[in-house]
Image: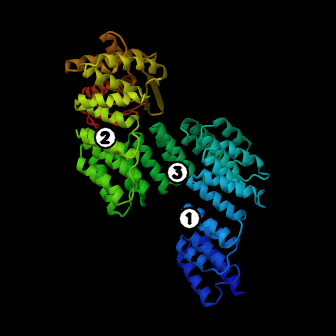
Amino acid sequence: MLVSHYLHQLQLCVRRHTPLTAKNLHAQIIKAGLEHCGPLPNTLIDGYGKCGLIQDALHLFDEMPHRDHVSWASILTAHNQANLPHLTLSMFPSMLKDDELGPDHFVLASLVKACTTLGDIRKGKQVHAHFVLSPFRDDNVVKSSLVDMYAKCGLLDNARGVFDSISLKNSVCWTAMISGYARHGRKSEASDLFQRAPVRNLFSWTAFISGLVQSGNGVDAFYLFIEMRREGVNIVDPLVLSSIVGASANLAVLELGKQIHGLVITLGYESCIFISNALVDMYAKCSDILAAKEIFGRMQRRDVVSWTSIIVGTAQHGQAKEALAIYDEMIYAGVKPNEVTFVGLIYACSHVGLVSKGRYLFKSMKEDYGINPSLQHYTCFLDLLSRSGQLDEAENLINSMPFKPDEPTWAALLSACKHHNNIEMGIRVADHLLSLEPEDPSTYILLSNIYARAELWEKVSKVRKLMAFMEVKKQPGYSCIELGKESEVFYAGETAHSMKDAIFGLLKKLDTEMRRRGYVPDISSVLHDMEWHEKERQLFWHSERLAVAYGLLKAVPGTVIRVVKNLRVCGDCHTVLKFISTIMKREIVVRDANRYHHFKDGECSCNDFW
């Protein structure tokens, strides 16, 4: 009777996740002399695990005179729940060796879960082999876990093989398979499976939509979300909203993001921390950093993602000192920074030339927080040194870092050589970069400019020939602008837009005024073999100029013009947009492939180094 009473109390404790109650119950069980009685020890381990008391669970497990399959399943599950999957796997051999127990289906499912979390497909296949050779080879729960593992690790054909072998498919395996196809760009197979699913609930919709967002198919994700709303699916879990806010951020579609924000408020999920984090990130990526700050300021609870999102957002928008001040607030609030936080901080330092502060942060991430710098951290630190003219130190860093430098890393150093007119180092870096057979067309423009400054015309010719070949593969430049519910896309070159004449007229008028103020077109970015006036004409029709002109003609007077460009803004357009911001007395924000440019009163937030 007493055992039943404690079992019931422990089960309530597990459901409510109350650590103190679990410890009190354990003490009462010991006083009653029932610590080794029946199912109580295993239930206590399970309770400690679910309450986050992993050390208590492990201590109890180690003290057990007899451990069975339930004991092992409970302690392995507890380690998974504590996000310690490596310990789950490292403990398993003891089950075979010390307790002479083979894994049952519950233990196998825990092992598969650990492999999934670690992304360790090699060990995952070993567990799969154990499963196939075990008496539990037909267990559908373990098979569902294997489908999830293979799908998340990108082995979709393996996942489908296990999926097809399941006699009674549950919602977990359907969702895992649909999500796997969607996340890895196999849209048609995801759609086919989604249509065939016996039950299409919120979680299957979320899996499909989130997968599409993660694979860069944000537009398809929006259409699917609209379909879900039309079918009247009740959003009882906000994860799908987080995904669709993320799609707005990736597409930089501000108005659509605002509509989703309105839906979030209507459904009462704005106070949900991961939704607020997604909104901060979305507004920052959609160039409305003020709205991002406003949401951050209203948050009642903030985690490391909250702080990191606003730090990275302010840094990307050129507000470096503010980003560093927010970091100080974060540390004062007792929140430990992560890898992404330091990317944003070092990036911020590079914008204002705070070399000492950047060095301190680069050192601090390792010494104070145990974070090993990644290639991205090294690239940001290199950018800081390069911007500040510390080119020798930058070159030493690139040659000594524990990663093989990639094209963007070398290009950052080469751009600095050009900016600081260090031709000797520029040639050395350019030769190395050229040997890497770069893929970004802007890298070839940079190479051509460096060689031209050094009057190495043979190398200029070689780069131009390579550029001519690259032209076949080059992604066409385009710029998007949103005005309310309308969205327009402009491609480089003369446009067939219905407002072509008005756009041309405004650009021509602006060109005349800019030249009067001292503007001289920079044709160095045009590598085609043509007359100088043809090169000027080609610059005149760059997509960002068309989009800005359209915005000036159509937007409400005084509002910010926001443009998203798929490629890097060229040097001439950067100069032109500074002029336009002064002439038209308008703020212009351009998000290009590299960063955000806030043009206002003839200045840019990037300080002319991008």
Q: Which of the 4 image quarters holds residue 17?
A: bottom right
Residue beneath disc 1: 87
What's under tag 3, amino acid-wise?
Thr
Estimate the x, y position of residue 402 in percent, counting from the top left: 39, 47
- Mark 1: few/some/many CA within 10 Å (<14, 14-19, 20+): few
> Contact, CB < 8 Å: mark 3 with mark 2?
no
Classify 10 Å Cα crowding around label 2: few (below 14), some (14-19), many (20 and above).
many
Which residue: 33% across, 35% down? Answer: 412
Report how far apart the C-alphas of labels 1 and 2 lie in the structure.
39 Å
Which one is nearer the viewer's eye here, 581 or 71? 71
* Residue under numbered circle 2: 383
Q: Is residue 98 visible?
A: yes
- Mark sitting earlier along the chain (3/1): 1
Q: Earlier in the sequence, mark 3 or mark 2?
A: 3
Q: Give the quadrant of the C terminus.
A: top left
Nearer to us in this view, 204 or 435: 435
- Counting residues from the start of the chain, the first of labels 1 and 2 encountered is 1
Residue occupying image coordinates x 31% and y 40%: 383
Secondary structure at numbered mark 2: helix
| Tag shown at residue 266 | 3
